Amino acid sequence: MQKLLLLVLAGWMLFAPRVGRADEDRGWRYLIERLVADGLDRERVVHAFADPRMEPFTGLDFGLNPRAPHSLYRGFLRASSVAAARRCRAAHAADLDAAEHTTGVPASLVAAILYVETACGRNTGSSRVFYRLARLAMANEPANLRANIARLAGDVIPDAEIERQVRERAQYLENTFYPEVSAAFDAADQMGVDLLDLRGSPSGAFGLPQFLPTNYLRYGIDATGDGYIDLFDSADAAASCAAYLADKGWHDGLSERDRRMVIWHYNHSEAYVEAVLTLARRLDTDAPPCVQHAAARSRTGRGASPSKRATAAPSTGTAKRSRHPARASGVVHRAPPPVVAQGSAS
């Protein structure tokens, strides 16, 4: 009888939930196991999520139809903002004009985007990028999905249509942000920074142009030639932003409709598109002369910006040199657009 009880107890323990495992993974087990299954080194992944700088996952509430109101961007077209954008255009004329020469994307357009995104680098965000991306990628985690269905569709007899929308939204967020979490490891290696030291927006975008990691890897340009792509450096940021827009189809002679479509790729918000294009047109009415100035760097990499010379804690990956481009402080100057886009999302 005692042997039978022991066998029953052993069988129950075999199939019972692993009590304490959730605490060990600090709520991130769903994401950890997927990353490892997709080929990332388990030790490195577990180390990142166990780091004290990485907050535990305690849930993510999300909406079904987020939209960016026009009021969010209206301020960028005030006289004071246009004047500030013109100063940005003038201060970084060499970098912006070089990007235009290489890609054909107007310097005024790139300047407008850099100004709308981060006030020309003054407000690049203070959120820990990896945590923000990972949190959004957990939208479809089973327990989190159930909690959002109960919250939005009802926890007794859920509204079938709303439940369908909740499931679609959770899948959309996971599909959008899971690749960014995976890419963040490679991006940190290429930048030579500790994965958890990179700071940006609450949606996980970073640098002057507010790129997500996959776009950093695909469109990042080392305009200074120092061997690193630093989106907190104006030369690299301008070149990378212009490269993105050129790849999305920007060229001379585009119709207004096609211009809007290119900017739509950058941020899926009509209000954003209108603000950027209007600001770019206003910058064109008072374009600064193309002059060399103290902010211009040699394209050979000599005289790199302070952000290119700064150091950080050693990377948890394979980077050979430590750098820290994430030097800005304060919160991002605007709420992140609620519709997932190139540079920022939620």
Image (spheres, helix red, strand yellow):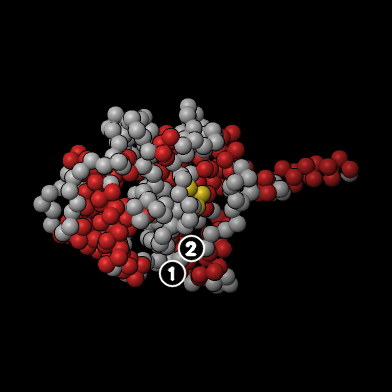
From the top left corner, tell me how far across and down residue 187 is, in percent.
Answer: 43, 38
Of the 4 image quadrants, the one containing the C terminus is bottom left
Q: Residue at x 43, y 45 (%)?
A: 180
What residue does disc 2 label? 62
Helix or strand or loop: what does disc 1 sit on? helix
Q: Residue at x 48, y 63 (%)?
A: 62
CA–CA distance in space, label 1 to label 2: 16 Å
Q: Residue furthest front?
A: 294
Q: Is residue 15 left or right of residue 163?
A: right
Whether residue 146 is visible: yes
Nearer the observer, 299 or 52: 299
From the top left corner, tell me how far across and down residue 279 is, in percent.
Answer: 24, 61
| Location of residue 64 (image quadrant) | bottom left
Nearer the observer, 253 or 324: 324
Mark closer to the chain start, 1 or 2: 2
| Location of residue 173 (image quadrant) | bottom left
| Location of residue 257 (image quadrant) | bottom left
What residue does disc 1 label? 161
Q: Residue at x 37, y 51 (%)?
A: 121
Q: Residues within 10 Å of mark 2 (few under 14, many from 20)?
A: some
